[in-house]
Image (tube, coloured by chain):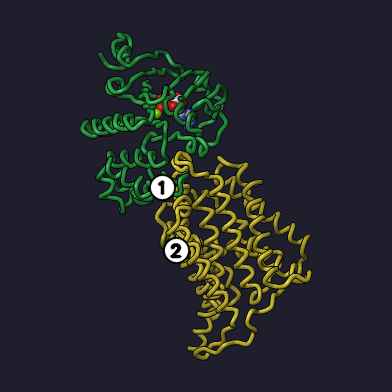
Amino acid sequence: MLEIRDLRSAYGRIEVLHGLDLDVQRNEIVCLIGGNGAGKTTLLRAISGVQPVTGGSITFEGQDITGLPAEKRVALGIAQVPEGRQIFGGLTVEDNLNLGGWLNGGGTQKERDDIYALFPILHEKRALQAGGLSGGQQQMLAIGRALMSRPRLLLLDEPSMGLAPVLVEQVFGVIENLQQRGITILLVEQNAAAALAKSNRGFVIETGDITHSGASSDLIGDPKLREAYLGQ
Amino acid sequence: MPELLQFAFSGLTVGAVYALVALGFTLIYNASDVVNFAQGEFVMLGGMATVFLHLAGVPLPMAAALAILITVGVGLALYAFAIDPARGSSAVTIIIITIGASIFLRGVAQVVFDKRFHALPHWFGSDPIRIGGAAILPQSLVVLFGAGLIVALIFLIIDRTLLGRAILATAANRLAARLVGIPVRKIVALSFALSAAIGAVAGILVTPITLTSYDVGTLLALKGFAAAMLGGMGSAVGAVVGGLLLGLAESFGAGLISSKYKDAIAFLIILGVLFVRPQGLFGKRSVERV
Ligand SMILES: Nc1ncnc2c1ncn2[C@@H]1O[C@H](COP(=O)(O)OP(=O)(O)OP(=O)(O)O)[C@@H](O)[C@H]1O
Ligand SMILES: [Mg+2]
């Protein structure tokens, strides 16, 4: 579904992705783990078209999207739940969802109801300013907003960051639920143990290069990774 | 008493124009963080283009409509050729670009049009209406009514439509806006087009009363900026209130003290706001950019 070949990206003259390869097959949950500053966010932003690439290619469902503007990629079915949630704090919860459906004229009531069924608390707070939500609720809103664009591939950038363990469980539960609905997931996580446990395959990124990849169950067993990322 | 009423009416009339200029500032500032000092030139272009198209034989309503279109074209060109290429530059750089654009537009207007003052006919004649001893030009009512209509329209767009929400979202978080598929550059271009149209309409409405010439934009931009600062940069309500207050302050100042210092009032207001309440009357955000 998604194929990334020899991708390079830089901030100014400093290259931070050094030609990396990664692929995601239809209806998989793939996780991307790596330490601070490894380039995870940069990679997701490059896939969404909000970070310039300096080399390589990104192919989505057979189509080269490397030079496509961000809105065209959303239209093709790539949505992102960005790092730090990035909700529109001054707007209401419902407006945030409607804007998620921007390319579909704001989305339908049924689509909003689907999101509210997934996250009942959002329904309760739908008329309130999104900036007043708790961290966990904002994360749900960010996921709901991304779903409103009817994605086939959902990119999630550290959705568990800063959440209490109960909420982390809930977020991972939602991700599995989305997979069952036929949405393909690329999940970035620092919480490597949880991410590997919930995903089908995994990639490990270190300073802009993919160093390991394989079935998540194999990666969990890899002694070197256990030491570096699982703290064991 | 009739005197005070007179001051109030003329204050509200100019104030309505300042309010429209300030609203233009606000729209662009909100969508892009750009303070567009060429905003006054939009007002000039609206008036001047109508005058010259009319002189060339185009019927007035058509001339006015064409003038608005031309001004919108200039607004879009300003964005595409001057502002957009400087994306990512510092706020100061972009302010200097808009000041440059304003000087450029004035220069072009001087060549394409001329350096004289021009008037347009009053819409409903120039016989004053007497209200409570004050004499009000029918055109003043046209200005007030027209400005009210535009303000209502803009608020409706921002408050009631998805497009308006997208403008606010672009202003609040560009990255997130792009990630949901909002074409942020088109949104910013739209804000320039809207601002240009508002400015042009203001120019067309007020030219019968105040006359116009190639260089009326400079002072109007300053007044509009002062009004926007007073209301709180970024607040649309603030822009309107700020504009009306500035108009009233000028009118009463000129009437009760001396008309010599009329134009200084805007500067005093800018200074006063900066010292006393940098966020303005209705501003929420701190003005760390200024
Ligand atoms: N806006 C920026 N300007 C310059 N350098 C940046 C910028 N954003 C990130 N970087 C650098 O690019 C590299 C990769 O950053 P990135 O944010 O992609 O890492 P990450 O894997 O997402 O890290 P984290 O786990 O902390 O979120 C880092 O060295 C970082 O310092
Ligand atoms: Mg990151």
Q: Is residue B208 above or below residue A191?
A: below
Name the residue: 38% across, 39% down: A147
Q: Is residue B158 above or below residue A189?
A: below
Q: Which chain is yellow?
A: B
User: Residue A73 shows which numbered tag?
Assistant: none
Q: Are marks 2 and 1 in contact (CB under 8 Å)?
A: no
Residue B10, horizontal then vertical, whole percent: 55, 78
Graded by Cα atoms within 10 Å as few (under 14), some (14 to 19) or many (20 or more), the crowding at tag 2 reads many
Graded by Cα atoms within 10 Å as few (under 14), some (14 to 19) or many (20 or more), the crowding at tag 1 reads some
Identify which residue, B206 or A53, lies in the foreground.
A53
Q: Secondary structure at mark 1?
A: loop
Q: Is residue A35 visible?
A: no
Identify which residue, B139 or A212, lies in the foreground.
A212
Residue B49, horizontal then vertical, whole percent: 71, 65
Name the residue: 45% across, 35% down: A77
Residue B125, horizontal then vertical, whole percent: 65, 84
In the displayed orientation, state which residue is furthest to the top.
Answer: A223
User: Residue A107 shows which numbered tag?
Assistant: 1
Cβ of mark 2 under 8 A from ligand 1: no
- Quarter of the C terminus of chain A within the rendering: top left
Name the residue: 64% across, 74% down: B210
Ligand 1 quadrant? Answer: top left
Q: Secondary structure at mark 2?
A: helix
A50 sits left or right of A130 in the view: right
User: Residue B237 shows which numbered tag?
Assistant: 2
Q: Amino acid at mark 1?
A: Gly
Identify which residue, B265 or B219, lies in the foreground.
B219
Q: Is residue B165 above or below residue A144?
A: below
Q: Amino acid at mark 2?
A: Val
Residue B58: quadrant of the picture: bottom right
Q: Which chain is green?
A: A
Image mark 1: chain: A
